[in-house]
Image (spheres, rainbow, N blue to C red):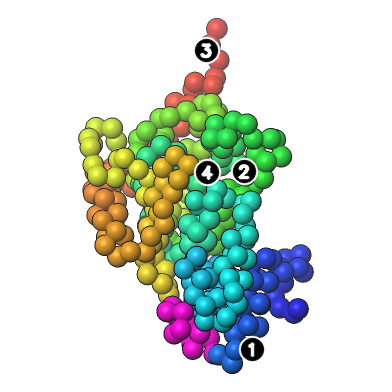
Amino acid sequence: MTGRTGPQGRQSNEQRYGDELRRRRETAGLTQGELAEMVVCSPSLIAHYEAGRRTPNPADAKRLDQVLGTDGFFERWRDTLAKARFAEHFQEAAEAERLAVFIEEFAVAYVPGLLQTKAYARAALKVARPNSTAADLDKKVANRVERARILENPQSPTVWMILSENVIRTVVGGPAVMAEQLRHIVELGRAGRIMVQVVPFGAGAHPAMGSMVSLMRFSDAPDMAYVEALYTGSLTDDPSLVRRYRDAYDLARAAALPPEASLDLIASVAKDYDNHERPPHS
């Protein structure tokens, strides 16, 4: 089989999946546009699938099998892709995040994954999975850090993060880890790579305070929203639900400090963590 290769000259599983989809489509005598019409999606989405840039969601994979007569082949193969990289409930959200052109997130407890330093990620993941082996923890940390590489691209995506003050006050990994993490957020914010706001404790209650919510916008697909709770998460493109999540996010933003004041607060808290690490003068 020929096709596109990754940085090491070998195809990824996603690229092999895409090549197989292209081969089956061509064997069926269909153009990308014709297959898209039958699967009920956009031709550009089929192009993304075939290029290995995006993995079909379960419903699309099932429809691909129905249209191409592949007896569940693409649905079963899809379920094996990237199983080890992220928690099962986050698989689709991680794929969507990678393709989004605009990401907005409200964080209620932890620093959002896209902003996490290696040390913070390790501490957070270790708490979530206390029985993980060292090798498994290393792999999960590497995967989380890899997610953040999308911030290295100045073209995409635009990222707007709103943090509950609880996020910057809760000590994860110790004061030194928190100081480094908060300085990292301030650096990203002051470099103009991300927009950050903090909802202070004094702002009181607001609709988003009970859960994290991530809103994603795409150039060729409907907006999506992802919400997460303990060991579970939900990704949706249902317009009515996305609108309700959007309303909650906007109300959290209205309760937040302005961006510059937010960065000043985060920097101040980082300094407090630094001081906590220094021994008192004798």
Q: Residue furthest top?
A: 282
Quadrant (top left, top right, bottom left, bottom right) of the N terminus: bottom right
The reply to whether the magenta stretch includes residue 41 is yes
**Residue at screen point 50% across, 52% down:** 90
| SS state under label 1 | helix
Could you tell which of marks 2 and 3 lies nearer the N-terminus?
A: 2
Q: Give the crowd class for mark 2: few <14, some 14-19, many >=20 residues within 10 Å.
A: many
Question: Where is residue 23 drawn, in percent x and y?
Answer: 65, 83
Query: Which portion, as a residue range, is magenta?
Result: 31-42
Left or right: 203 in relation to 161 = left
Residue at 62% over, 71% down: 73
Above or below for 159 versus 185: below
**Residue 176 screen position, x and y as percent:** 55, 28
Label 2 sits on a secondary structure element that is helix
Kind of residue at badge 1? Thr
179 left or right of 108 in image = right
**Disc 1 residue crowd, few under 14, some 14–19, many 20+, Cα 10 Å:** few
Q: As displayed, is residue 59 above or below residue 38?
A: above
Q: Position of residue 4 (x, y in %)?
A: 69, 75
C-beta proximity under 8 Å, tags 4 and 3: no
Q: Residue furthest front?
A: 71
Mark carried by residue 141? 2
Is any part of residue 9 visible from this angle? yes
Q: Is residue 186 left or right of residue 21?
A: left
Give the residue number, with chain letter if any, for mark 4. Answer: 116
Provide the residue designation for mark 3. 280
Whether label 2 touches label 1, CB < 8 Å: no
